[in-house]
Structure formats: structure tokens, C-alpha cells
Image (spheres, rainbow, N blue to C red):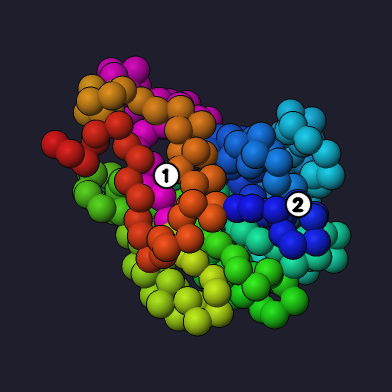
Amino acid sequence: MSTVDDGSRPVVLVTGASSGIGRATAVALGERGLTVALAGRDEARLTETLTSLPGEGHRSFVADLTDPTACAGLVDSVVDAFGPLHGLAHCAGVQTVQPVRGSTTSVVDGMLSVNVTSALQLVRAFRRRGCRAERASVVLVSSVLGLVGQPGAAAYSASKGALISMTKSLALELAREGIRVNCVCPGTVATPMLHDLARTIGDDGVQKVAEAHPLGIGRASDVAASIRFLLSDDARWVTGSALVVDGGYTAR
């Protein structure tokens, strides 16, 4: 993503920026000289991210995207602060290991609300004229479990598979508006979500997960680099793609 014609720096909204892939993405964009609007639920952790970013002019915005109706308000607040956005990296999401016997309506609805509905509502708000630049890019964070199955992950897999299908449809719909839409499909990455998973499946389970990745468990920065590429002008002819970043997990 190059500097815009008036000499100002492009602005990208990154959700889930308080930790994990979202935080790594914010840092990666800051390193390339972009201005980053950080969004997340935890103000203290957002502040930690903000203070770690290279460059100046970044700002944080507290928003709870478990309520999809908050999405438009978040975009409006960011646009009020910075003007039209050049990119959106939607990294916020939830992951729960839940066997089908425990997949109650509330569990499934909660998963879909955060992982799917909030993504669609953010893009809906982002695409409005005056909210985004003439050429803009959206990157959603899906998962390899949107492509392959895993026991105990039916609801999560369904939500991440929906993001992949959503990406393709949005890419076709928004191309005429100058907006590219792509997603990344990470394998297992060393983030707080992995620590939560370890409490559920134990150390032996985590070891098996690591062994299923030929290149080992990844880092959040590995995924962030891919997101940064898809947001940039280097990917100007890429839209509707699901970029797999998984250390070889789906190559088996």
C-alpha cells in the first residue's frame, strides 16, 4: 500500500489488535509506515499494543465486536479521527473446542455472531462512500479449519468456512467499487488462543498439533506478514483469495 497522492500515510483499521495476530498485524503495518487504528475490547492491552508500534499518529478504539451492531459505530469513530480508510484487517474472533454434544444454540450463535456476522457488518460499514479510499483492501482472518475438519470444532469450522465463502462473494460484489477482499487461513499459531487450547487438550494434545505442522507451530508475525501483503499494492491484482499460511498443515 503506497503513500496516497496528498503525501499523507494510508490508514488501516485492525480489529483484535490487543493480542495475537491482530497485535502482530498492527506492528507489521506500523513498520511499513502506515497509520494504524487499533480496535479491541481490552483498553489496557490495546494501550500495550499502541505503545509498541513504530511511527506516530496511531490511535486505539475500544469496541466490543461480540455485538455486531457496534461495527458501524467503530468505523464511524475511526473515520472521524483519520478520514477515509485504505484498509481493514479483521483479526478479531473466537475459538472454542466444543464437541457436538455441547454445541448448544447459544454456543453456535455466539461463534457465528463474532466470527461471521461482525465481519460482514464491518465490511458493510467500511464500503460506504466517505468511509474508505477510492482504492481499498479488506483482509479477513479465517483458518485452516475452514478448509479441513477437526473433531470438536464443528461450530468453529463452520464459522471460518463461512468467512472463506463470504470473501469470494464480497470480492465479486465490491470489485466495481475498487475494493479488494481476501482472507488468510492460518494454521496453529503461538498466541493466547493456543494457551487456552492447551488447557482443554493438554500438553500431549498440543504436541500432536505441533507435529501435524511440518514446519512447526507458527508465529503471529508469520500471518501478519501475509495480511500486510494482501493489504498492499503488491497484491493489487489479488482478490477473492484464501491464502493458506499453515506451515504445511493442509499439505498432508
- The answer to whether residue 52 is above or below residue 17 is above
For the point 37% across and 69% down, which residue is it?
Answer: 168
Q: Is residue 25 magenta?
A: no
Q: Position of residue 228 (x, y in %)?
A: 54, 45
Residue 8, image x and y in percent?
80, 55
Residue placed most toward the observer, 98 or 92: 92
Residue 245 higher or lower than 80, as above or below: above
Q: Circle 2 sits in a helix, a strand or a loop, which is it?
A: loop
What is the x, y in percent for residue 30? 69, 38
Residue at 75% over, 67% down: 84
Q: Which mark is residue 96?
A: 1
Residue 164, image x, y percentages: 36, 62
Asked if residue 42 lies left or right of residue 169, the reply is: right
* Callout 1 amino acid: Thr
Residue at image point 49% right, 47% down: 229
Mark 2, residue position: 9
